[in-house]
Image: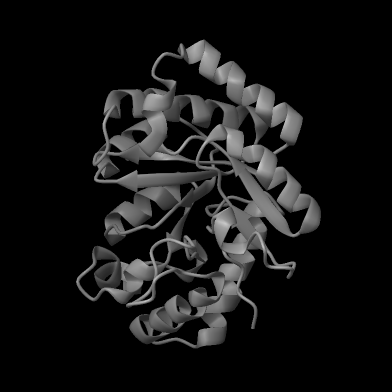
Amino acid sequence: MLIYDSHCHLEAIKNDPRQTKIAIPAILPEDIEALFKYRKRNPYAKIGLGLHPWYANKFINYSNENFNNYLEQLIVEYQPDFIGECGLDKNKPEFELQQKLLHIHLELAKKHQKPVVLHSVRATNELLSILKQYKNLRGIVHAFNGNSETAKQLLRFGFYLGIGSLILNPESQLSKSIEKIPLSQIILETDAPYMPPYEVQYSHPYHSLIYAERITQLKKIALREVISSSNTNWNNLFIRNISVNS
């Protein structure tokens, strides 16, 4: 049974001739041109536009208005399917700037009615505080590794939880809370070619099956049920534009 990947980078699949449902985030805004060309080859692909928080300092000299205008011009020109990858990461510098840039991404997502793919590392409280300021957003928190209470709050804000290789770590918060997270909020991802499972050097979209199998073990449900639900969530978000809490 085919699994739709909700987070896979272009370098992992750019030479793959297969046409499958896959969501590819941008790391830098200028990535959108290459993603746009890939979408022409694979019309099932969904592409993002955004600035990964690791690279916030590249735009340190931009005013809020200039950065907003820059992103909006690219949205109009390339018509991305979602906004992201954007978000917050306390392991990287310029955290205050990251927050300002995230607000701009969210404002544009709301204005253009696009889903958002969020990166969040050691910044759960700050992310939740920002999301409280917006209504009618929808999207995915990529590489979720929080507890069930955080999952509930993100559900209220309209966000699915991207589940990948962290589910394989029995000591992760995710593994300990997955039983309490409803399938209707779970969406499978690989982050390929990054965050590989076990001792593999690179990850690939086919690794999502490993993560689905682990979810079935922890939740004690059928594999088909996990895959079917994740694929439905993918379609709801990227095709039907339905929020997780609709």
Asked if one can make out residue 6 in the rendered structure from this viewpoint, the answer is no
Residue under the image location 65 percent in, 58 percent down: 236
- For image coordinates 40% across by 46% down, the residue present is 119
Residue 90 placement (x, y as % from top left): 25, 39
Q: Which residue occupies the foreground of this view, 29 or 79?
A: 29
What x and y, as percent, mark residue 74?
Answer: 67, 28
Q: In the image, what residue occupies the spot 67% across and 63% down?
A: 15
148 versus 219 height, above or below: above
Q: Please state if 115 lies on the left or on the right of 130 as rendered.
A: right
Left or right: where does residue 46 sit relative to residue 204?
right
**Which residue occupies the foreground of this view, 159 or 193?**
193
Position above or below: 43 against 31? below
- Residue 87, quarter of the rendered image: top left
Instruction: Name which residue lies at 55% across and 76% down.
Output: 206
Where residue 20 sits: x, y (%)? 70, 67
Q: How is the image coloured?
A: one colour
Q: Is residue 207 among the parts visible in the rendering?
A: yes
Question: Which picture quadrant has residue 78?
Answer: top right
